[in-house]
Image: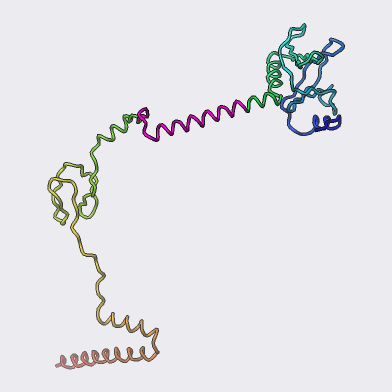
Amino acid sequence: MKLNERSLAFYATCDSPADKAGFLYKRGERHTAYHRRWFVLKGNMLFYFEERESREPVGVIVLEGCTVELCDSAEEFTFAIRFDGTKSRTYVLAAESQAAMESWVKSLSRASFGYMRVVVRELEKQLEEMRYGMAGGCAGGCRGSPGSEKPKPSELERSLERLPALPTVLPKENGCAAWNNASGVDQPREASGCGGDAGGGNLRPPLRPPLRPPLLPPRRRAASTEVGSAAVESPSSFCQLHERYGREVAQLRREWLEGQRGSRP
């Protein structure tokens, strides 16, 4: 990957989030004076600007193959970025407080890809150990090895085991289930026909035939049948029904009139 000044300047000032940013004092390479600069850490690149509002960085430090350590200096809260090699440059920086110095040293020490590779390898190693431990534990516990022990029951489980067991078939009193029937308590026979064993709690109600709806009167049933069939058959069926019931009504009216005549003096 090729990098030039324009690409570095764009990456330093783009909207991508920075890992850390703040003011630090940087010692010059030729002159030992310290200059206040605005530092921005993105990935493994440490950019520094003359001011916070500057559009282009003054320089960049690639944090690969280096160590970040504290150093002795006349200034307080100083630390150095040292690279491997005899002719490599050492960058001496100073923070404004002890907390800021510790925060910068920690962030710069973890910015290199070499550090990230070490962290990834350690995490992979821990993951493999966890998988191996889980597989070994399942193999030992699932096969019923002598070393696997069942967990001891708690006080609540032991107290529940001492409670009397409920009957398999719940008794009924007047057609309703009775829940207060503990084992070993005699239940009296009810007059409603519910009975059972005299010494047990398993009372069973007698078998009853299923209820059937009452039969309809002959006339009403015949009427409903004929009316129902009248909807399907021809209209003459309705006329026949009308004539039939009309004759009955006329017969009843004649009987009533004769009774009225016979009662007169």
Q: Nearer the viewer, residue 226 or 198?
A: 198
Answer whether residue 142 is magenta in the image. Answer: yes
Q: Pick the residue in front: 174 or 205.
A: 205
Coordinates of residue 256 in the picture (x, y in percent): 21, 89
**Quadrant where the N terminus lies?**
top right
Q: Quadrant of residue 143?
A: top left
Quadrant in which the C terminus is drawn:
bottom left
Q: Nearer the viewer, residue 91 or 33?
A: 91
Image position of 206 with respect to 236: above or below: above
Query: Which residue is rendered at x = 87% and y = 12% of the image?
Result: 30
The answer to which image quadrant residue 97 occupies is top right
Q: Residue furthest left?
A: 198
Relative depth, front residue between 225 and 203? 203
Q: Decide whether the magenta segment is chiefly helix, strand or loop.
A: helix
Q: Position of residue 122 (x, y in %)?
A: 60, 25
Residue 124 placement (x, y as % from top left)? 59, 29
Q: As displayed, is residue 61 above or below residue 248? A: above
Span shown in magenta:
121-149
The image's colour scheme reads rainbow
Question: What residue appears at the point 84 percent right and 25 percent down from the top-left corner?
Answer: 57
| Above or below 37: residue 14 | below
Q: Using residue 230 as the reference point, say whether residue 61 is left or right of it.
A: right
